[in-house]
Each structure stands twice: as structure tokens, then as C-alpha cells.
Amino acid sequence: MHCPAFPALDWWQQYLLQPSAVSFFPGVIKDRKLALNRYQILTASGPILLSIPLKGGRERAQSLTESRIDYTHDWQRQHSMTLRSAYGRAPFFEYYGPELLDLILTSHEVLLDFNSAALNWAAKILGVSPSSSILGEIDQPLSAPTLAAPKTPVYHQVFEDRIGFYPNPSIIDLVMAEGPYASAVLS
């Protein structure tokens, strides 16, 4: 299981069950379905996918350690405005939003650094420590056993009254809706 930017809820459930199943695989990533530079949030209009642009684009196969973030696009401003618009009135935005926006606005040279910062942000809120296998040993991929599909966590989503319940958004949605109770929702 690889670590994308702001992983979805099912990723976090599996991580909480088996932290060693997660890796920052440094090998060449050719499978675009891994979406290691994208994360999904919920808005009043429905789910949207935010993407961190990479130098060389999506067509170039490269590793996480080689994937350089492209700052010729104003993606940081766009992401921060979208996040503020989507979650500005969420119950816990006041507590966790400023740090999230600071993380988005911080320039990271490579995608690995951004994803690591995103993982640490969420892990701190969930009260878990990122495994040293994630942050310290990126020389070899970890073999990940197939885990049973996690039960969909149910919580009150910010836009549930407009778009219905959406089962697997980014951890950002759960944090903004449940704050310090997010970890209990995932259990």
C-alpha cells in the first residue's frame, strides 16, 4: 500500500491495522492509478479531486524521490482556496485548517516530502506515530499482505445534507468534521 497525498479513509483504516503494510516505494511509478499526487475532498457540489502538478507531467514514469513538484502553476493558492471554501464552516476547521493551509502553502521540492508532511499532519491529529518504515527506510518496497476490506466509517459529513454520504474521501474531510474524534471513527 503506497502513501498518497492526504490518504483516503480506507487507507488510514488499513494503516491503523497494520502500519508496516504502508511504504513510500521509491521505485519507478508507472501505474497512474496510484494517484500519489492527488487527493479527494468533498464540496457542496460533490467530490472533487485536487492534483499536485509534477514536473514532466503525468506521462513521465518516475519515482517518488524523483517526482519534483511543479510550481509554475499556482496550485497551492487554488488548493488552499478550495479547501477554505469547502471546509471553512466545518466544525473543526478553526482548529486544524490553519495548519493544513500552511502545509499546502509550504514549498516542498519533491512529492515524497509533501506526502510525508501530509501524513505527519493527519497522524498527529489521529494520535498515531507514522511508522519508521514509512519515513526512514525508502530503499526497498515493503510487501503488503492483502487486508480485508475495511468497514466504511460513518460520520456526519459537512455536505451530507446536499450530496448525501460519500464513503471514502480524503482524511481531510473526516478531520474537519470530527476533529479529535476522527481516530475513534476509523476504529
Image (tube, rainbow, N blue to C red):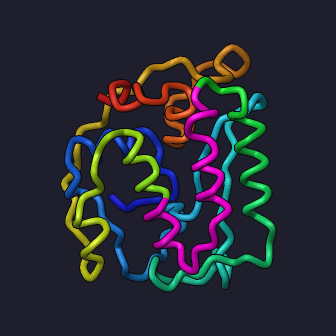
Horizontal side of 183 relative to 116 (left or right) equals left
Q: Residue at x 47, y 44 (%)?
A: 8
Does residue 105 show up magenta in the picture?
yes
Q: Position of residue 31 (x, y in %)?
A: 48, 70
Q: Residue at x 30, y 77 (%)?
A: 138
Horizontal side of 152 relative to 137 (left or right) equals right
Q: Position of residue 34 (x, y in %)?
A: 48, 62
Horizontal side of 64 relative to 72 (left or right) equals left
What secondary structure predominates along the stretch shown in magenta? helix
Q: Residue at x 73, y 18 (%)?
A: 162
Indicate whether 6 appears above or below 109: above
Horizontal side of 81 relative to 3 (left or right) equals right
Q: Residue 184 lies in what quarter of the image?
A: top left
Q: Residue at x 51, y 52 (%)?
A: 6
Locate the C terminus by quadrant.
top left
Locate the N terminus by quadrant.
bottom left
Instruction: Report the number of discs.
Output: 0
- The segment highlighted magenta reads 92-117
